[in-house]
Image (tube, rainbow, N blue to C red):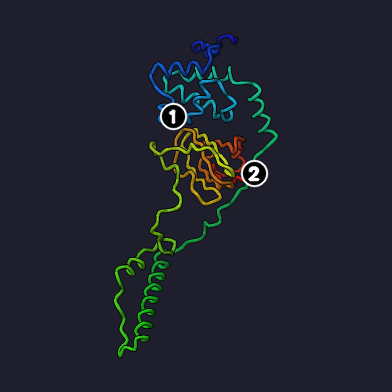
Amino acid sequence: MSNPTTNPKNAPTVDTSHPLGQRLKQAREKKNLSLEDVASQTNILKRHLVALEEGDYESLPQPTFARGFAVNYGRFLGIDSQVINQSFDAQYPANLRQKYEDFKQNAPLQPMGTLQRDSYGGLKINWFVVIGAIVALVVAILVYRTIKNAHHENQPQQTIQEVTPQEQTTGASLSNTGSAINMQAPASTPIATANSASTPMSTGIATAGSSTLDIWIQANATINITDATGKVIMQGDYTRGGHQLTGQAPFNVQIDKVNNVSIDFNKQPMNIKQYAQNNQANFTLQ
């Protein structure tokens, strides 16, 4: 059993011998909160909350994420962050800490990620011209079909029928990419949007052939992630918090403010800062 530790700056003494998990569980039960209540209000996965309360550190992500989950959980319950930090550092298994340190030194991200440069900076498109050309093409096709039908019916005079409401809708439904808008619902929608506190996070267990991303955001950052199927699994501006995503690798990742973001790919910590330029990164995880 470890002895109480004292902060060198004359901070109050913290009893690190009291198990962190028990401290969190007792504080939660005192407030009559369930694990589901805490998970919905803190955006921390329920299984991570269970692991923290049971002291099952092997079921948690790398120490940076695990400490962040513990601090956020404790702050939500009204426990001093200093108590959580010192208890976590004193009780986190040394063998797990060494495991992650060895991995960072011996297994860099380079074999799994490739830096991509944006090559579209000088390209400018006048969408009004593009849309106008497509509308003209649609009208020309309609006119041609009308004249052809009139000719086959051997009418004395060729007449051009008026464009029907449905055809007008077809001509008007043009996207800014120069193609007709698909009126059906899109095959996939983003699972995270900008600063949406009510948007549910992805908590599904990875299926066969799928991969997982554990993302910890320490401060404001903009993140866009799509998987191999083109599905947008994360998009928008985010504040401090943790997210777990599931999808098909490879993942295309774009991050603004890289210094505020950490990523685990299939439970392996990634050194994404080596691909950053001006605190921005655009790379692929595969």
Query: x%, y% of residue 2?
Result: 59, 10
The residue positioned 36% from the left and 82% from the top of the image is: 149
Q: Residues within 10 Å of mark 1 (few under 14, many from 20)?
A: some
What amino acid is found at the position of numbered circle 1 in the picture? Ala
Say above or below: 1 vs 114.
above
Mark 2 sits on what residue?
A: 112
Query: x%, y% of residue 17?
Result: 55, 11
The kind of secondary structure element at disc 1 is helix
Query: x%, y% of residue 11?
Result: 50, 13
Q: Earlier in the sequence, mark 2 or mark 1?
A: 1
Query: x%, y% of residue 259?
Result: 54, 37
Q: In the depicted view, which residue is nearer to us: 137 or 205?
A: 205
The residue positioned 41% from the left and 68% from the top of the image is: 129
To which quarter of the image does residue 31 belong? Answer: top left
What amino acid is found at the position of numbered circle 2 in the picture? Met
Q: Nearer the viewer, mark 2 or mark 1?
A: 1
The residue positioned 55% from the left and 53% from the top of the image is: 118
Say above or below: 224 vs 163.
above
Quarter placement of the N terminus: top right
53 to the left or right of 2: left
Q: Residues within 10 Å of mark 2 (few under 14, many from 20)?
A: some
Q: In the depicted view, which residue is nearer to us: 103 or 61?
A: 61
Mark 1 sits on what residue?
A: 39
Say above or below: 140 vs 21.
below
To which quarter of the image does residue 112 belong? Answer: top right
Mark 2 and mark 1: Cα distance apart in space: 32 Å
User: Pointer 2 and pointer 1: residues touching (CB < 8 Å)?
Assistant: no
The kind of secondary structure element at disc 2 is loop
To which quarter of the image does residue 165 belong? Answer: bottom left
